[in-house]
Image (tube, rainbow, N blue to C red):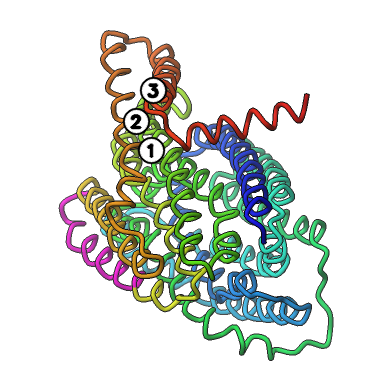
Amino acid sequence: MAENSLKEKTAKGLMWGSIGNGAQLILGTLFGIFLARLLSPSDYGMVGVLQVFILIANTIQDSGFRMALANRKEVRHEDYNAVFWFNVGSAAILYALLFFLAPFITAFYQKSDFAIDHDLSALTPLARFCFIGIVTASLGTAHYAYLFRTLQVKQKAIITITSLSISSLIGITMAFLGYSYWGLATQGVAFTVCNTILFWHFSKWTPTLPVSFKPLKEMFGFSSKLLATSICGCINGNILSVMLGRFYSVTNVGIYNQANKWTSMGANLIQSTVLEVAQPVLRNVADDRERHKRVFRKMLRFTAFIAFPALFGLAFISRELILITVTDKWIESVPLMQILCACAFAAPIQALCMNLVISKERSDLILWNTLAFGTIQLSTVFFTYPYGIHTMVCAFATINILWLFVWFFFVHREIGLRLSEALLDTTPYAATTTCAILATSFILSGLENIYLLFGLKIVLTALFYTLLMWACGSATFKECIGFLSRKNKHKS
């Protein structure tokens, strides 16, 4: 693929990824506010303790074949077909297994000291209902792989926005009618149903019978390592919810999940925007080491350019945001949200490094790296839980930041990127964001009106960050402005 063609497709992908994920962030925020006002922390906790089981089951039924399809140089109908029928079959088996395990999941959380006086028997039927989403999601994984491989980011943006709108309206309606956590559960299932229907609508591919599973053997060596990695990733990302549900209460899980929800929306916006195009683009240049390094560094700078102001800024406005949107009944989530935001910039950068390693077909490196990370994370959280929730979250955040250096080591091995180069590509944006926040804090130090404070924090921080980027002559900033200017000229 020619340099200019690749650059144009990457730019368009990033643009549509930004539009789609930006709309998703706005809609998710609005609908999330309505739900948080209608529901209690314990309602969120009831659904939150089940998320790790749903995510692991979805990962197992996918088995890494979706990414394996995207990473193959040539893909035939037989490849998609084998993945589709394997996913559907494995999802059906997993649902049957989890259906019978639901009472044991309830018993696991019921044994918590904080849950002794609370009846969690409703968790069993709730779990069985939530697990339906595993089966519906399996019907669309091959179609999603087709859209992902062909860089149809615009279509994926439409799918996400539509599914989020419909499912959120269903969830809000049920919560308003008094169905509490059942509204949240139905929202999750409805989202996967809408996604699957729209994947089929926009994809040009349809499954057929009979099916040959021979292509799975060709992809298994690569996909199996991604499967193990994804399972570890699910556990790593949800270990705090599991530990809180087991050693504390579902209310604590709800408070943590509220903080994590706001943080994740910001981190996922950045991560999804970049990763919509990162893996396919990096795979296209994987055979040219210097070009591979050049493309990766540009993506790394762009990720840092948007990650630090978005996530540090979110921590900066967290108190006002919680009080204005979901009221003071969620005020306990503010310090947790600030800690999580302080480390959340690591997630999109780690994901970018992971995609670089995947593009080099080194899924084994990802597996062992994730296993080591999960082991250290699990051990740290287990040993810190007696000291309170805040200590657990601080330990979790610290490990996430420090593990960036491990990922940079693997990137160095694959494309020769030195640690000094990685830091040069990222730390200026962290420093610039910090300066912008400090300047804004100084100016607004005497202001007490929460609404004015919220608005001015956003406006002034964004203004200072933009001015500092312009004054420093940031190449990434200039490229973004140049790209937007060209698009506006074409429209006019």
Image location of residue 14, percent across then percent down: 60, 45
Q: Which residue is mark 2?
A: 433
Q: Are marks 1 and 2 in contact (CB under 8 Å)?
A: yes
Q: Disc 1 on helix, strand or loop?
A: helix
Q: Which residue is mark 1?
A: 308
In the rendered image of this protein, does residue 428 appear above or below residue 290?
above
Q: Earlier in the sequence, mark 1 or mark 2?
A: 1
Horizontal side of residue 152 vs 117, given as left or right: right
Q: Name the quarter where the C terminus is drawn.
A: top right
Q: Residue at x 42, y 11 (%)?
A: 452
Between disc 3 and disc 1, the foreground one is: 3
In the rendered image of this protein, does residue 431 appear above or below residue 449?
below
Q: Nearer the viewer, residue 235 or 366?
A: 366
User: The residue under label 3 is which amino acid type?
Assistant: Ala
- Label 1 CA crowd tier, 10 Å (few <14, some 14–19, many 20+): many
User: The residue under label 2 is which amino acid type?
Assistant: Thr
Q: Which residue is mark 3?
A: 471
Instruction: Tell me which corner region of the image, top left, top right, bottom left or bottom right, holds residue 262.
Output: top left
Q: Name the quarter where the N terminus is drawn.
A: bottom right
Image location of residue 358, percent across then percent down: 49, 69
Q: Residue at x 65, y 50 (%)?
A: 4
Q: Which residues are magenta?
A: 369-388
Image location of residue 42, percent across then percent down: 42, 46
